[in-house]
Amino acid sequence: MTLDRSRLLDHIERMEDAAQQATDFVIGLDKSQFLTDPKSQMAVSMALVILGEAVTRILKLHPHIAEDHPEIPWMKIKSMRNLVAHDYFELEFEVVWKTVHEDLPQLLSQLRALRQIRAQGE
């Protein structure tokens, strides 16, 4: 395996880990509990920043990956990272809750498939 592909796989794994952590942080919480729990909000927010950072690095290393894999919302993930990192006080935690419950499970499946494809040498 080339160093370039190895780095790509590392960043995909970081994305996967961060997405999984974000979902794990809300296990056992309902929406109202999450919306009133700053510790969980900050934990999920940091996981979203890490997820977005990994995307930024992937897009820098492999600028065509977004075209090759349009099923993954690369720019939305990066935009969410920017919102969390730069406009945290404007962040709508209802949107974060929805992201964790509706978008991240699908993203996790997509990332697992992408990691398999890339590991096989696409």
Image (cartoon, rainbow, N blue to C red):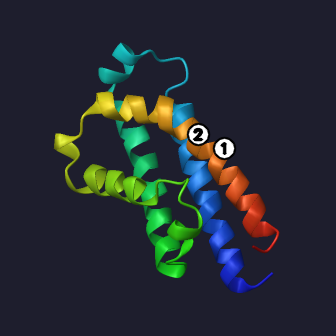
| Residue at 53%, 39% in the rendered image | 104
On-image quarter of the N terminus: bottom right
Can residue 46 be seen from the camera position used here?
A: yes
* Disc 2 element: helix
Neighbor class of circle 2 (other Cα within 10 Å; few <14, some 14-19, many 20+) is few
- Taking the spot 48% from the left edge, 64% from the top edge, the residue there is 55
Q: Position of residue 33 (x, y in %)?
A: 37, 16
Q: CA distance from mark 2 to mark 1?
A: 5 Å
Indicate the amino acid at tag 2.
Gln
Q: Are there few (<14), some (14-19), or many (20+) residues within 10 Å of tag 1? A: few
Where is the C terminus found, in terms of image quarters? Answer: bottom right
| Quarter-of-image position of residue 28 | top right
Can you tell which quarter of the image residue 89 is in? top left
- Position above or below: 20 against 2: above
Residue 36's x, y, as percent? 29, 20
Amino acid of disc 1: Ser
Q: Nearer the viewer, residue 121 or 40?
A: 121
Residue 67's disc number: none
Q: Which residue is mark 2?
A: 106
Residues at circles 2 and 1 in contact by the CB criterion of under 8 Å: yes
Residue drawn at x 64%, y 53% as measured from the top left: 111
Residue topped by disc 1: 109
Q: Residue at x 43, y 58 (%)?
A: 52
Q: Is residue 50 left or right of residue 69?
A: left
In percent of width and height, residue 74 lies at 46, 59
Q: In what element is the residue under mark 1?
A: helix
